[in-house]
Image (cartoon, rainbow, N blue to C red):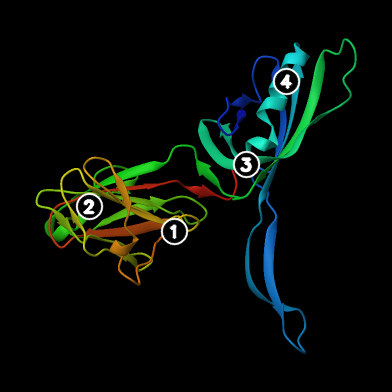
């Protein structure tokens, strides 16, 4: 039997649990189903239209739940947790041990029937709007690679599979949609010079220039298409923008479904490379 648990973490506030003492989750809609936007264009003198592409619209998650006892206090808790003025929060869903999250805002404030004297329960219904429709793993995956001959690498922790020296490594990505990565390159002795990080499966590479990473120094590259960034972190922990360290023509690659072969090299030195990502799911 599948067990479900759902909670909403408002921006800067305590999480509200939909299953707790005297609080009972009744139903959830929108965990997997989602509206699709189909892009087409008409052609003069031809039947129908030509398909261009399709993508997901914003996700809407609807929740039904019941509260019992201490209705006045619980109603205040609900009003506080789902105040739309708090902005974007996080909806956390768990089933049979698997845990997911998605950014969400209150689209329809909790609605209940008329409150009457001596009532012992209230049934609530509300909706969340999720601007980005993908569910993510609640906990991101981080893998570490060790530099070897010529800076080429093979992985040492799962979900990476071991490869022969000099062949790079493979990330077995199980998400439904592409995932951005955070690339964390840490300096070495001798200094790591101009590292290159390539997703050989897609043929896309990030090439750096004028980089000289010593011990305790880092280069952080976030390939998130909504908020890409490149930062140098000094040994003292001070961050500075480093977009000028990326060679023109570099592609901020993402992980695709299946095996992604990752290659890593540098002109000199033996830097450490960490890659962090979250699986993206079109439904859970």
Res 262 quadrant in image: bottom left
Cα distance in 3D space between marks 3 and 4: 21 Å
**Of discs 4 and 2, which sits in the foreground?**
4
Image mark for residue 256: 1
Q: Earlier in the sequence, mark 3 or mark 2?
A: 3
Cα distance in 3D space between marks 1 and 3: 25 Å
Q: What is the crowding at mark 4: few (fewer than 14 residues within 10 Å), some, or many (at least 20)?
A: few
Cα distance in 3D space between marks 3 and 2: 38 Å
Q: Name the residue located 47 percent from the left edge and 54 percent from the top edge.
A: 227
Cα distance in 3D space between marks 1 and 4: 45 Å
Question: Residue 271: image x %, image y %?
Answer: 18, 51
Q: Earlier in the sequence, mark 2 or mark 1?
A: 2
Q: Is residue 222 above or below residue 209?
A: above
Residue identified by numbered label 2: 154
Q: Is residue 74 left or right of residue 202?
A: right
Which structural element holds mark 1? loop
**Of discs 1 and 3, which sits in the foreground?**
3
For the view shown, which residue lies furthest in the left direction? 190
Residue identified by numbered label 3: 104
Front in this rendered view, residue 24 or 206: 206
Q: Earlier in the sequence, mark 4 or mark 2?
A: 4
Residue identified by numbered label 4: 76
Q: Name the residue located 66 percent from the left edge and 26 percent from the top edge.
A: 18
Q: Earlier in the sequence, mark 1 or mark 3?
A: 3
Which structural element holds mark 4? helix
Which structural element holds mark 3? strand
Question: Residue 42: image x %, image y %?
Answer: 73, 80
Question: Residue 15: image x %, image y %?
Answer: 58, 26
> Which quadrant does the N terminus fall into?
top right
Cα distance in 3D space between marks 4 and 2: 54 Å
């Amino acid at each position: 039997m599948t067990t479900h648990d759902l909670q909403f973490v408002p921006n800067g506030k305590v999480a509200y649990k939909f299953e707790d003492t005297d609080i009972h989750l009744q139903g959830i809609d929108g965990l997997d189903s989602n509206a699709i936007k189909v892009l087409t264009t008409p052609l003069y003198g031809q039947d129908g239209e030509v398909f261009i592409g399709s993508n997901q619209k914003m996700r809407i998650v609807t929740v039904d739940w019941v509260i019992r006892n201490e209705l006045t206090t619980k109603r205040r808790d609900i009003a506080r947790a789902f105040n739309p003025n708090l902005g974007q929060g996080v909806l956390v869903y768990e089933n049979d041990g698997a845990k997911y999250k998605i950014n969400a805002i209150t689209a329809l404030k909790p609605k209940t029937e008329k409150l009457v004297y001596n009532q012992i329960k209230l049934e609530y219904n509300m909706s969340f709007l999720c601007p980005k429709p993908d569910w993510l793993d609640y906990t991101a995956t981080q893998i570490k690679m060790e530099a070897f001959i010529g800076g080429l690498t093979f992985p040492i922790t799962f979900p990476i599979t071991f490869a022969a020296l000099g062949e790079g490594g493979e990330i077995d990505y199980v998400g439904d949609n592409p995932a951005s990565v955070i690339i964390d390159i840490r300096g070495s002795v001798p200094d790591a010079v101009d590292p290159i990080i390539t997703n050989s499966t897609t043929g896309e590479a990030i090439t750096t220039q004028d980089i000289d990473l010593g011990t305790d120094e880092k280069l952080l590259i976030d390939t998130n298409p909504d908020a890409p960034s490149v930062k140098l972190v000094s040994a003292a922990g001070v961050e500075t923008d480093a977009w000028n360290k990326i060679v023109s023509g570099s592609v901020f690659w993402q992980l695709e479904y299946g095996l992604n072969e990752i290659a890593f090299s540098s002109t000199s030195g033996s830097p450490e490379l960490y890659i962090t990502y979250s699986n993206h799911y079109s439904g859970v």
